[in-house]
Image (tube, helix red, strand yellow):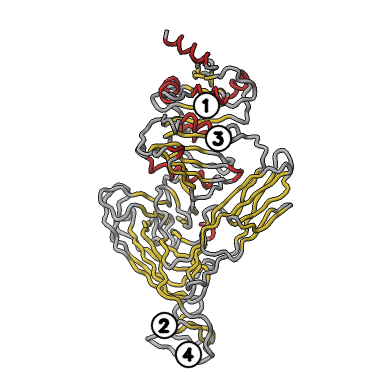
């Protein structure tokens, strides 16, 4: 009786009642529920939404997508799209393989046949384990799905380089492992070429318990969004102001695989790059930044590509190659934009962020806050594999480890190792070009502070800390340290804080440098480094003194132009003494 009454109400509202159906996939009969608005018409969108673990399609549709104010049926009816709720096998999903990917593909084909669905406007989402399935589908179905949504379902994969930029909406309550969401989204933010700094809308839709984070637009105009729900747990939000069904549709409906606006991507520089210049006040100099982009138009031609630094126009290109150069940049975070305009006057924008920084103190470990990732600015090598930041998704090898013992010296540390045992074959370096960061040092006296311990070396292994030129690997200064703490190969072990070490060195010549840490010259030696900071204590005057004969002095150190201390400078040349350049005849 209740089912009949419900059917009558739905039909009165212009909706067909939700129906169950089956389809055979890989020899297995699979089932799903479907909502089809009355008078749907042709070439309408499709949303597929997957339930969580130990749930089913009916529960997803009738419990989590309904409240007293609105229902998913009403959203479908207003926007005229089909919504399918699939059933997982044994109320679960294959979040790493292809079994349920093939199920979703089969549903798409049936919906296209039965309801003349627009293949360019198909969207996929899920709750909890269904959200994990959604992330699994991105690399495998980005050519068929226009936008993806996860509600309380963590990412279980990292982007493939072959996957197009993809729009992603993630919805999560702060009482539901919220701290793990941002790290899971970071790889997708970078993959999409989105700015790494989010735009934040507090009290989203007038709801004080909602905060919307937006990264974008990135390449092809896509965004990554995180809807943060204060104090919400592991459930679908059904508040009047923030009804999940509406939020999903409002986000997805902005995207189509056959968009008519131009495609534009910034291919260089990568978003999140940093250029750091230690120099006397007002004397910081930053490198020129070449911005390159690709652009095409799916239904016409690209008339021009304009390059901006914020709102300042840098250059306009009317033909390929699309390229511009940012010169004379000041210390600030720069949002670089490429705006493509087609022959119909439609535009698309791609952006990247590049930071120019002129510090007196720099924390090199500021991004040691995401386990299983390699932070931006850092490069590691273990004699076999070279890794560059920012990258993530590592379960072994060089990466950031999160320590969870009840007593621990620090929360996060960068782990690296030396597999073959040869000297300088296991290292972590800050400032190499492939790490996305440059470190320019003016002549002066510097202090590097750090904490170091071993990870799995009960007998300990000596560590070398060095400052090197960025090109040529010339060592300017180095220091060795023997750790006295070994964590014991388990991140949950307790360990005390390693003593803070201080490494002082002088830079004699302006240039780009690298901070390097080497593990011992023994097989499988390792190191955990954390809490690094670099400070410029003083800067040296520039210029060269008149020629004179330089005599060695035990009280005033002398350096060559590579920054190496010279006790007896008998050879003719230019040296550094008392902070000034002097000529030895």
Mark earlier in primary sequence (3, 2): 3
Label 3: how many residues lie within 10 Å, few (<14), some (14-19) or many (20+)?
many
Q: Which mark is residue 557?
A: 2
Residue in the picture at 46% in, 46% down:
200
Callout 4 crowding tier (Cα within 10 Å): few <14, some 14–19, many ≥20: some
Residue 457, given in percent of the width and then of the height, sits at 32, 55
Residue 262: name its quadrant.
Answer: top right
- Please state which of residues 561 and 525 is positioned toward the viewer in this rendering: 561
Question: Mark 1 highlights which residue?
Answer: 48
Packing grade of label 1 (10 A; few <14, some 14-19, many >=20) is: many
Q: Residue at x 60, y 30 (%)?
A: 121
Between the C-alphas of marks 3 and 1, the distance is: 11 Å
Disc 3/disc 2 C-alpha distance (Å): 63 Å
In-front residue for pair 183/465:
183
Please tell me whether mark 3 sits on a helix, a strand or a loop: strand
Give the vertical position of 207 relative to 521 (above or below): above
Give the number of the disc on residue 147.
Answer: 3
User: How far apart are the alpha carbons under marks 1 and 4?
Assistant: 80 Å
Which mark is first along the chain, 1 or 3? 1
The secondary structure type at the circle numbered 1 is strand
3 or 2: mark nearer the eye: 3
* First in sequence: mark 2 vs mark 1: 1
Toward the viewer: 332 or 364? 332
| Callout 1 touching callout 4 (CB < 8 Å) | no
Q: Quadrant of the N terminus?
A: top left
Badge 2 density bin: few <14, some 14–19, many ≥20, Cα 10 Å: some
- The residue identified by callout 4 is 550
Residue 43: image quadrant is: top right
């Amino acid at each position: 009786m209740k089912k009949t009454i419900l059917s009558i109400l739905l039909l009165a509202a212009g909706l067909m009642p939700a129906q169950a159906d089956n389809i055979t996939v890989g020899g297995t009969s699979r089932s799903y529920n479907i909502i089809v608005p009355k008078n749907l018409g042709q070439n309408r969108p499709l949303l597929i939404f997957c339930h969580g673990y130990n749930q089913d399609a009916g529960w997803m549709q009738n419990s989590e997508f309904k409240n007293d104010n609105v229902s998913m049926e009403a959203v479908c009816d207003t926007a005229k799209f089909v919504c399918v709720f699939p059933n997982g096998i044994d109320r679960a999903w294959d979040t790493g393989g292809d079994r349920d990917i093939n199920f979703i593909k089969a549903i798409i084909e049936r919906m296209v046949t039965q309801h003349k669905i627009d293949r360019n406007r198909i969207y996929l989402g899920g709750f909890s384990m269904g959200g994990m399935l959604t992330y699994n589908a991105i690399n495998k179905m980005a050519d068929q799905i226009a936008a993806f949504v996860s509600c309380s379902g963590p990412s279980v994969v990292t982007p493939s380089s072959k996957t197009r930029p993809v729009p992603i909406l993630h919805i999560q309550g702060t009482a539901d492992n919220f701290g793990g969401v941002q790290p899971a989204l970071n790889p997708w933010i970078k993959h999409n070429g989105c700015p790494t700094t989010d735009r934040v809308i507090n009290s989203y839709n007038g709801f004080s318990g909602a905060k919307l984070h937006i990264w974008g637009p990135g390449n092809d105009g896509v965004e990554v969004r995180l809807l943060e729900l204060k104090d919400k747990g592991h459930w679908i939000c059904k508040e009047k102001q923030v009804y999940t069904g509406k939020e999903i549709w409002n986000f997805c409906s902005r995207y189509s695989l056959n968009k008519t606006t131009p495609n534009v991507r910034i291919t260089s520089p990568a978003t999140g790059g940093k250029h750091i210049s230690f120099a006397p006040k007002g004397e910081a100099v930053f490198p020129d930044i070449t911005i390159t982009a690709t652009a095409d138009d799916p239904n016409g031609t690209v008339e021009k590509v304009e390059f901006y630094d914020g709102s300042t126009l840098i250059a306009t290109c009317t033909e390929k190659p699309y390229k511009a150069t940012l010169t004379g940049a000041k210390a600030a975070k720069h949002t670089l934009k490429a705006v493509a305009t087609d022959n119909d006057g439609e535009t698309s924008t791609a952006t990247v962020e590049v930071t120019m920084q002129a510090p007196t103190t720099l924390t090199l470990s500021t991004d040691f806050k995401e386990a299983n990732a390699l932070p931006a600015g850092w490069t590691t090598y273990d004699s076999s594999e070279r890794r560059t930041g920012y990258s993530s998704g590592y379960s072994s090898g060089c990466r950031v480890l999160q320590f969870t013992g009840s007593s621990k010296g620090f929360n996060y540390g960068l782990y690296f190792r030396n597999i073959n045992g040869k000297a300088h074959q296991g290292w972590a370096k800050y400032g190499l070009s492939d790490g996305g960061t440059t470190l320019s040092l003016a002549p002066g006296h510097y202090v590097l502070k750090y904490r170091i311990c071993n990870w799995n070396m009960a007998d300990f292994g000596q560590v070398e800390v060095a400052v090197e030129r960025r090109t040529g690997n010339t060592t300017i200064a180095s220091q060795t340290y023997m750790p006295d703490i070994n964590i014991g190969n388990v991140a949950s072990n307790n360990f005390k804080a390693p003593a803070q070490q201080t490494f002082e060195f002088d830079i004699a010549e302006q240039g780009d440098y690298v901070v390097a840490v080497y593990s011992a010259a023994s097989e499988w030696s390792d190191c955990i480094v954390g809490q690094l900071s670099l400070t410029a204590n003083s800067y040296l005057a520039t210029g060269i003194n008149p020629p004179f004969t330089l005599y060695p002095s035990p009280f005033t150190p002398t350096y060559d132009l590579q920054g190496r201390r010279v006790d007896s400078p008998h050879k003719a040349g230019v040296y550094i003494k008392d902070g000034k350049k002097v000529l030895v005849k």
